Image (cartoon, rainbow, N blue to C red):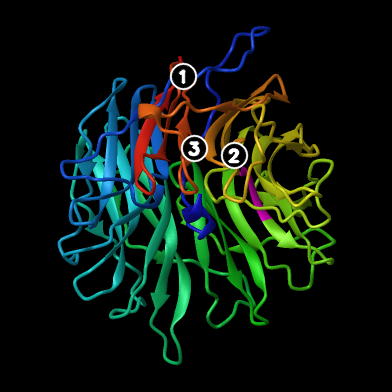
Amino acid sequence: MKFARAALLISAVVTMATVMPAGASMAPTWKVAQNAALPPGGTGIPQGYLPALSCPSAGDCVAVGDFSDASSTTRGLILNETRGVWRNPTMITPPANAAASPGITPYAVSCGSAASCAIVGSYQDSSNNVRSFVEEKVNGRWKSATQVSLPANALGSGQNSQLRSVDCASAGNCSAVGTYIVKAARAQRIEGLVLDEVRGKWRRAAETSLPSGANENPFVSLGQLACVSGGNCSATGSYIDANNLTHGLILNEVAGKWSRGTAVTLPANANAYPNVSLSSVACASVGNCTTIGTYESESANLEGFTVSESAGRWGRAVAMKMPAGAAANPHVFFYGFSGISCPSAGNCSTGGQYRDSSGKYQGFLIDQVNGTWRPAVELTLPSGSLMAGKNGGVVAMSCVVAGQCSAGAAYLDGSSSYQALTVSEVDGVWQTGAKVTLPSGATSVGVDGGVYGLVCPVSGQCTATGSYLSGSTNYQGFTITTN
């Protein structure tokens, strides 16, 4: 999961495998993973980068990432599933002003319907600027990517704009967030941007409004958002204040209008220099959202926290309690995917990574039940496993019903090889994780591979995507479904 550790805050969704009848809950089972075909000339997935998946209905999915061609040039990759069959993959067509080697990097994808999707990311133009792009699927056909129209105060030459997350509540109604560089008289500054599509038309990006006391250069980072309906979204990130302290940043869009951002109020034991980082956000309904992150305590321990919005008001953050046997400094870590799911207000589940008292990296899972966060439990690995590992732990999470969830994870097996894992919560109890059987006799997902996208509709098969090692250094993509 190296690219996630490099702070690529990318959208991906995990939900439970099926909705079981009352009294008949059981963990889902998964088929053998299948190799994901690449466009003609494709040789592999650089650094295992296949991070994002969206499935508006069972068997209708889109996954995005990168692939390398025969000349070792990195291209944008789109995998398309229609009615349960993965069709010919396609390449992201760069905007007209792209460089010959544009370095297309898609960060997120969201589909408002099977025929309507949006991909966001960045690319390099012919003048060596980094620009943001949107590529859309309209009426079932992919268009060429287009450059995002930045706010009027954007720097021209030397620009570095990144769109990190997108969520489409319905066909033609999407929101996206990211960052850009502002042209300023004394010094450049990094600001956040929000971008909305309304009834099929993308508006010009707008600069985010920060809390009072922000630094002249606030170094804004926006990585995740969740939209309940068109024009009703919440986004999370960070900024620094005039004292160079890093704060968690929350932005709300209500009825199509983005409000001034708010800083997260941390737990009482927060350090004066808390080094806050916000990861994923999920919304159960308009005005009822929850986000997760990390902060440093007074003892300089890196702890996890959650903060929830109720009826449109964000409360104080709550510190997570790690499993029994955690180190005094648990070094809590979240991968920055959609690692939290809230099927209803006050009922959420999430997970990540921590260190135990022996110094081993372990995965953890934690639930909020009727508004109260329970202590985390350690991810239970298959027999003979060593630990989750520095590049392992829980990556993504989602629940259709409280207490019935699935998560994607990674761990070190008895031979010190990284493997992909799926784990299910059944009637509120987390089960032992199950190793993903990789395609073509592959024996490891490597340090950069694993399950990154997993979507399960209310009915029908779940679909997951990820990457694995097909040789000593070459990565390939895979797809997998439940029985």
> Which label lies toward us, 3 or 1?
1
Q: CA distance from mark 2 to mark 3?
A: 20 Å
Q: Is residue 102 above or below residue 227?
A: below
The spot of residue 323 in percent (x, y) is: 80, 41
* Residue 308 visible to an observer of this rendering: no
Characterize the magenta stretch by its predominant secondary structure: strand
Q: Residue at x 41, y 78 (%)?
A: 182
Q: Quadrant of the C terminus?
A: top left
Tell me the magenta residue range.
Answer: 283-293
- Residue 431 on image: x %, y %: 68, 24
Q: Which residue is mark 3?
A: 13
| Position in image of residue 180 (x %, y %) | 40, 70
| Mark 2, secondary structure of its residue | strand
**Image-quadrant location for residue 124:** bottom left
**Which residue type does callout 3 highlight?**
Val
The answer for how far apart the CA atoms under marks 1 and 2 are is 21 Å
Nearest the viewer among 19 and 432 is 432
Label 1: how many residues lie within 10 Å, few (<14), some (14-19) or many (20+)?
some
User: Mark 2 or mark 3: which comes first in sequence?
Assistant: 3
Dot 2, crowdedness within 10 Å: few (<14), some or many (≥20)? many
Label 3 vs 1, first from the N-terminus: 3
- In percent of width and height, residue 202 lies at 30, 53
